[in-house]
Amino acid sequence: MISATGAYISVKNLSKKHGHLEVLRDINLEVTPGELTVLIGPSGCGKSTLLRCLNGLETLDSGSIIINGIVLEKNEKTPSLSSDFDKKARAIRENVGMVFQNFNLFPHLTLLENITKAPVVVKKMAVKEAQEKAKDLLVKVGLATHANHYPCQLSGGQQQRAAIARALAMSPKAILYDEPTSALDPGLVHEVLQVMRTLDDEGMTQIVVTHEMRFARDVADHIVHMQEGNIVEIGTPEQIFTAPKDERTRHFLRNFL
């Protein structure tokens, strides 16, 4: 199910506090199916918190999130989070994968085991079926010969590609990436970004927090610039990089261009 606006992901008036610190302030964002949206902005501006809210890993203080027809909401009519928040959040995570900065692979499991674990445990997929799918995904991310390797035997780039394969094993309709290349050596960044480019070509809905401005400019459908918990500006790469409307965007991009 897609929202009435045509968006697969719809965020309205989302606010979030950590203690007295307002991390997100009245966020409004829509992402339609098949789009690759890049979130940019300085560290601490709320990008990662926004992703965690979208994946049900953070509660919200006000506003609503609609993903694949599942509604997480808190407002004057629903002053407290509904008792089924955790159930809804789990349902969202079954449809929306997340790739973290530090891979988060299970160190005691091989790549094949890492990738098959969630489909077997969460979706009750047969082990053999999950293994066949995992092997296909390892081919997709260029790790076909590494199925029986442990994470410690891989480079950072290989581990991050394995983490993407693990997210894909749940057959998500969207994937969120929280600075997926920031922990990598510069020479390994390209191999991870290339997987994301391929998924974009295949029509996967993706939201990416990154400082890789060339990737944002070349691949994104929309760029969202955040500052101090606010969305400052949303636009196409051409508009953001050649004629940003907000002075804060111009100032931020001077550090990269």
Image (tube, rainbow, N blue to C red):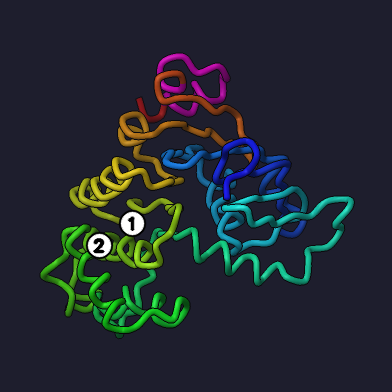
- Residue that mark 2 sits on: 156
- Residue that mark 1 sits on: 183
Question: What kind of element bears circle 2?
Answer: helix
Q: Quadrant of residue 28?
A: top right
Residue 192 x, y percent position in the rendering:
26, 51
Callout 2 environment at 10 Å: few (<14), some (14 to 19), or many (20+)? many
**Amino acid type at image mark 2:** Gly
**Amino acid type at image mark 1:** Ala
Q: Quadrant of the C terminus?
A: top left
Describe residue 192's horizontal placement relative to residue 7 as left or right: left
Question: What kind of element bears circle 1?
Answer: loop
Residues shaded magenta: 240-254
Residue 71 x, y percent position in the rendering:
68, 55
- In the picture, the disc for residue 81 is none
Callout 1 environment at 10 Å: few (<14), some (14 to 19), or many (20+)? some
Cβ atoms under marks 2 and 1 closer than 8 Å: yes
Counting residues from the start of the chain, the first of labels 2 and 1 encountered is 2
Residue located at (45% from left, 54% from top): 173
Describe residue 159's horizontal placement relative to residue 100 as left or right: left
Describe residue 70's horizontal placement relative to residue 124 as left or right: right
| 206 is within the stretch colored magenta | no
Residue located at (17% from left, 79% from top): 148
Looking at the rendered structure, the number of numbered marks drawn on it comes to 2
| 244 is within the stretch colored magenta | yes
Residue 23 x, y percent position in the rendering:
67, 49
What secondary structure is the magenta-colored segment mainly? helix
Residue 33 x, y percent position in the rendering:
47, 42
Above or below, 16 relative to 218: below
In space, the residues marked 2 and 1 are separated at their CA atoms by 8 Å
- Depth check: 104 or 66 in front? 66
Residue that protrudes farthest toward the front in the picture:
1
